[in-house]
Image (cartoon, helix red, strand yellow):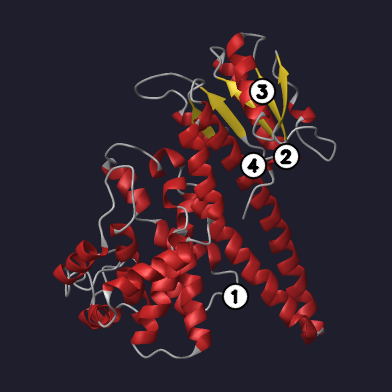
Amino acid sequence: MNVVMNKHRILIVGGDDSHTRRLVSFLSGLDLEIERSSARPRPSSLTGSRARFSLVILPASERRDREIAFLRDLKKADPHFPVVMLSNTAGPHPLISLLQEGLIDQVTSPDDFAGIYSAVRSGLARKQLAVENEHYMKSLTELKLEQSRNTRKTLELEEIYDTTLENLMTALDLRDVETFGHSQTVAKYSQVLAGILGIEDKQVLDNIRKGALLHDIGKIAIPDSILKKPGRLTVQEWEKIRLHPSLGYGLVKEIKLVKEAGNIIMYHHEKFDGMGYPEGRQKKDIPLEARVFALADALDAITSYRPYRRERDFQAAGQEIRKHTGTQFDPQVVDAFNKLPLERWEKIRYETTRLLPSIMEYHSLVTKT
């Protein structure tokens, strides 16, 4: 989903200094409507049907009590209203607590204009997705009631369900630009592997696709302070990360969740030798679709760039997968993977990711800036 930037008005709170004027000029040049205020506005002026602004950029204040009171009032009025805070504090960040509480959405350096633009783009997109998903879920409930009286509503219900799944997947990818497109790639890998293993039922294959798209939906419940932490996680933080399969299953079980999709969400971190989580299942006790997805997920992870390491080629990925046959991966699934030349897997990745021009354009813009 692309964010239509020129339909949003951004408020920058800051004095009439050269730095603020340069930031206003920079963002205005990116088709954003920008206004500046020397003081924080009333929360009521930022929310409601007559609200003039879609996002606010705030400098971190030394008067933390007033700052927190303002943010709480704002989020109470509109939980989805995006707030980007500017702070150049080094070391352990004092604003982590505001991120954990959900009072602010992004923290970036006031001198990092590209980072500010990234935070604005992400904030606007997430707000748009939240509003759309509320609409879709409300419509879904209404359609379920209507379905009991009129079965002709079924097709419309299915359309809204599929749209909701796509939006949830997009929301996940937007949390981390570096993994943008990951869900689409592993979904395609999973379908291809399932087909090699003899699964021909189109509905089952589509269910596997949906499960792959939503495999990390539980991470929506994990705070950014943990999910995007640049350093090593503590034991307590790692335990929270390990909850995301169960959290994800719980988030979507009230929707019309098919078996294959639920199995992928719940068991995609189980390992063939029983050393995975959340239940430590092993061998055939792990549903086949989850075993298939585990290999597809590893293939994409190994061949993708991450901030903490460079990507490796498909030759290295093949060696790594075969090395862990019988421990991390089901030998039957590895055999299916080996039946397709590595060049074909690379082509599948290219054909999937080439349909994502918006994020490529974004990376180009940030680099030039």
Q: Could you tell me the amino acid type at mark 4?
A: Leu
* Chain-order first, disc 3 or disc 2: 2
The quadrant of the rendering that contains the N terminus is bottom right
* Chain-order first, disc 2 or disc 1: 2
Mark 2 surroundings: few (<14), some (14-19) or many (≥20) residues within 10 A: few
**Relative image position of residue 358 (x, y in whole percent):** 56, 51
* Chain-order first, disc 4 or disc 2: 2
- As drawn, the residue found furthest toward the left would be 323
**Relative image position of residue 268 (x, y in whole percent):** 35, 68
Left or right of residue 88, residue 57 in this image:
right
State the residue in front, 309 or 171.
309
- Residue sitting at x 64%, y 42%: 124
Q: Could you tell me the amino acid type at mark 2?
A: Asn
CA gap, disc 4 to disc 1? 29 Å
Front position among marks 4 and 1: 4
Residue 204, compared with residue 252, is above or below; it is below
CA gap, disc 2 to disc 1? 36 Å
- Residue sitting at x 49%, y 59%: 217
Q: Which residue is mark 1?
A: 256
Q: Which residue is mark 4?
A: 124
User: What numbered label is drawn on residue 12?
Assistant: 3
CA gap, disc 1 to disc 3? 42 Å
